[in-house]
Amino acid sequence: MKKPLFFDDQAHIAEQFTIVEDHTSQLAALAFHKVNAYKLSLQNHAYCMSRAELHNLLKSTLFNYVHPCTVLQMVSYFDDSSDN
């Protein structure tokens, strides 16, 4: 059986989009549960982690977003001139 001369990239792109979408929705659900756990700890409900531990967890995992422009600036991307 001969292979086609061109490849259908639509299936590959759709699969990658589905993987990224699933990953994003799982991360959003995880963030939602972390925030709810922290809210419950503020109301003095019995919890397996202390309020300080949950605060540190939120701070280290949810509030560590860095804008892409900041990363490019840190690696001196904008200092070099482009020869386009």
Image (spheres, grey):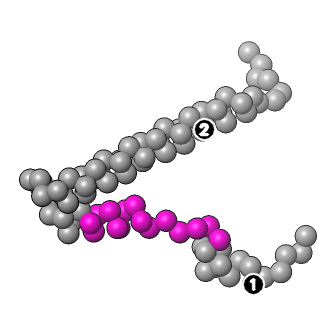
Q: Label the magenta part by its dominant secondary structure.
A: helix
> In the rendered structure, does residue 64 fall within the stretch colored magenta?
yes
Q: Between residues 76 and 57, which one lies in front from this camera angle?
A: 57
Q: Which residue is mark 1?
A: 79
* Residue 80 x/y as whole percent: 78, 82
Does residue 59 show up magenta in the picture? yes
Q: Quadrant of residue 35?
A: bottom left
Residue on which disc 2 sits: 17
Q: Nearer the viewer, residue 4 or 1?
A: 4
Please report the residue visible at 28 percent of the width from the left and 50 percent of the height from the top.
36
Residue type at mark 1 is: Asp
Furthest residue toward right: 84
**Mark 1 Cα-neighbour bin, 10 Å: few <14, some 14–19, many ≥20:** few
Picture quarter with the C terminus: bottom right
- Name which residue type carries label 2: Phe
| Viewer-closest of 7 and 34 | 34
Residue 10 circle label = none
* Label 1 SS: loop
Residue span colored magenta = 55-69
